Amino acid sequence: MTLVRVRISGDSMWPTFPDGTELEFLSIDVKTPLVGDVVLATHPFHSETRIVKRIASLEEEMVFLVGDNPDPTASEDSHNFGRIHRKQLIGFCIAIK
């Protein structure tokens, strides 16, 4: 079980998690991801970049991720890059600091 601490940078998860909010994520292999979970994932086009998004839908091995910001231009998510494979999920949120 791996615990990862991440600080939100930007407004894609606002208003739920404003810029600067610290979140803790537990390794995704601990539980099956569910719609509504906030997850840490590897960006599909920039493998060195980690993103925090909410699971909007699951279809077999593919996941549709979205930001919480109601402004559709405020989040780079699956609306931009499409569904990602479940293997790109790193962890699920367990705590807010």
Image (cartoon, helix red, strand yellow):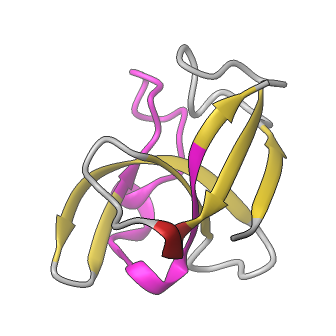
45 or 37, which is in the foreground? Answer: 37
Q: Residue at 40% across / 33% down in the picture? A: 72
Is 53 on the left or on the right of 52, as rendered? left
Is 41 on the left or on the right of 6, as rendered? left
Percent x, y for residue 45? Answer: 61, 80
Number of numbered callouts drawn: 0
Q: Is residue 69 rendered magenta in the image?
A: yes
Task: Choose top left, top right, bottom left or bottom right for residue 14.
Answer: top right
Percent x, y for residue 73? Answer: 48, 35
Q: Residue at 51% across / 76% down in the picture? A: 29
Q: Residue at 81% across / 77% down in the picture? A: 48
What residue range appears in magenta? 65-93
Percent x, y for residue 78? Answer: 38, 60
Vertical comparison of 48 with 63: above or below: below
Viewport quadrant of the C terminus: top right
Vertical comparison of 14 with 62: above or below: above
Is 53 on the left or on the right of 8, as rendered? left
Residue reaching furthest to the top: 15
Percent x, y for residue 9? Answer: 80, 37
Q: Is residue 92 rendered magenta in the image?
A: yes
Viewport quadrant of the N terminus: bottom right
Task: Choose top left, top right, bottom left or bottom right for residue 43.
Answer: bottom right
78 or 55, which is in the foreground? Answer: 55
Vertical comparison of 41 with 70: above or below: below
Vertical comparison of 92 with 16: above or below: below
Q: Residue at 84% across / 25% down in the picture? A: 20
